[in-house]
Amino acid sequence: MALVNTVEKRIKMQKDGVIKYQIITFCFLKDLQLSKSDLECLLELAKKGSINVTDFCKHISSLNIFKSPQSCRNAVQKAKKKNLIIMDGKNIILNPDMKIQVDGQILLDFKILGTADEIGR
């Protein structure tokens, strides 16, 4: 009979933390690197939904996530190349394939099995 070590954690956190966790988990599973500013930018986009890229970059700059709208535009382009953001004309949106939940109360229920590598043992 196989032995499985189980770790169960229950945590209550603010919605922004839950949204960030979803983004970080998606990026981890896709082996994508994010800076803290990139993460904050994606969090704000998740909360805003579809928004004009110029308005979004001004908003991000006003929150001091990036120092200027141009810095935000650079981050948006970087995220677009990583397929985290989709441009629809002049609007941007978080890629729906990420399946990030932002509305209402959110319960994340991940079940991940780490298998032992039997080769060489």
Image (cartoon, grey):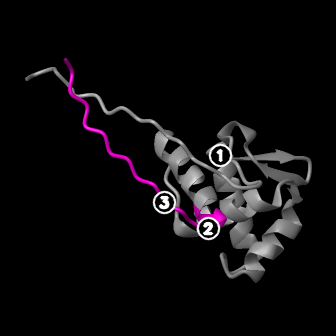
Q: Is residue 63 above or below residue 5?
A: below
Q: Secondary structure at mark 1?
A: helix
- Element type at mark 3: loop
Q: Can you identify the residue that label 3 sits on?
A: 11
Residue holding disc 2: 14
Q: What residue lies at 51% left-to-right and 48% top-to-bottom? A: 25
Instruction: Please name which of the two marks, 1 or 3, marks the residue nearer to the observer.
Output: 3
57 is higher (above) or lower (below) than 32: below
Mark 2 and mark 1: Cα distance apart in space: 29 Å
Part of the protein shown in magenta = 1-17
Choose mark 2 or mark 1, whichever is in front.
Answer: 2
Picture quarter with the C terminus: top left
Type of the residue with mark 3: Ile
Image location (x, y in percent) of residue 66: 66, 76
Assign a secondary structure to mark 2: loop
Q: Nearer the viewer, residue 46 or 103?
A: 103
The residue where tag 1 is placed is 81
Query: Which of the numbered marks, if any, corresponds to residue 69?
Result: none
Mark 3 to mark 2 CA distance (whole Å): 10 Å
Q: Is residue 30 left or right of residue 42?
A: left
Q: Quadrant of residue 113?
A: top left
Amino acid identity at mark 1: Lys
Give the image location of residue 82, x and y in percent: 61, 45
Residue 43 to residue 84: above or below: below
Contact, CB < 8 Å: mark 3 with mark 2? no
Disc 1 from disc 3: Cα separation: 33 Å
